[in-house]
Amino acid sequence: MNKWIELFAGLVLVIAAIAVWGYSANWNLLGVSLNFGTAAWEFLKGGIIWFVIMIGLLFIMLGISDLKE
């Protein structure tokens, strides 16, 4: 994969996951709570969010490694 695409994909995944986690704290749509932060902690202590963040960090590290070459 191209080093710049890896860096960009990693940054997008990390920022998007953190944004969804942080900004959805108290949303209520048609009586349905959209609190993704609490749901993530309840589901294996945020397993899905942490997985996305780790994949993003992996892409960032691969991109940095490719920049050194």
Image (cartoon, rainbow, N blue to C red):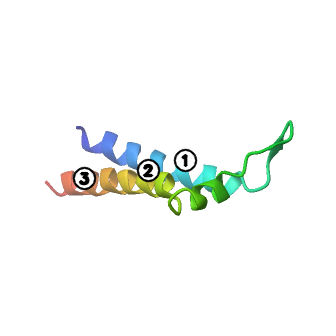
The answer to whether 23 appears left or right of 9 in the picture is: right
Residue pointed to by mark 3: 62
> Toward which corner of the image does residue 9 lie, by quadrant?
top left
From the viewer's perspective, tell me whether residue 10 is left or right of residue 58: right
The numbered disc on residue 16 is: 1
Q: Could you say where residue 47 lies in the image, as x and y percent from the top left?
A: 47, 57
Choose between 44 and 1: the one closer to the eye.
44
Q: Is residue 22 left or right of residue 53?
A: right
Which one is earlier in the sequence, the residue at label 1 or at label 2?
1
Relative vertical location of residue 29 with respect to residue 36 in this rendering, above or below: above
Instruction: Answer whether labels 1 and 2 touch (C-beta < 8 Å).
Output: yes
Whichever of labels 3 and 2 marks the residue nearer the N terminus, that label is 2
At x 60% / y 60%, what residue is drawn?
42
Q: Amino acid at mark 3?
A: Leu
At a point 33% along the width and 39% down the height, the residue shown is 5
- Extreme residue toward the left, this view: 69
Instruction: Using the image, tell me which numbered label, if any, was put on residue 52.
Output: 2
Looking at the rendered image, the disc whose residue lies closer to the viewer, 3 or 2, is 2
- At horizontal 38% and vertical 57% (from top left) the residue drawn is 54
Which numbered tag is attached to residue 43?
A: none
Residue 25 at x, y percent in the picture: 73, 56
Q: Is there a contact, CB below 8 Å, between mark 3 and mark 2?
A: no
Tell me the SS state at disc 3.
helix
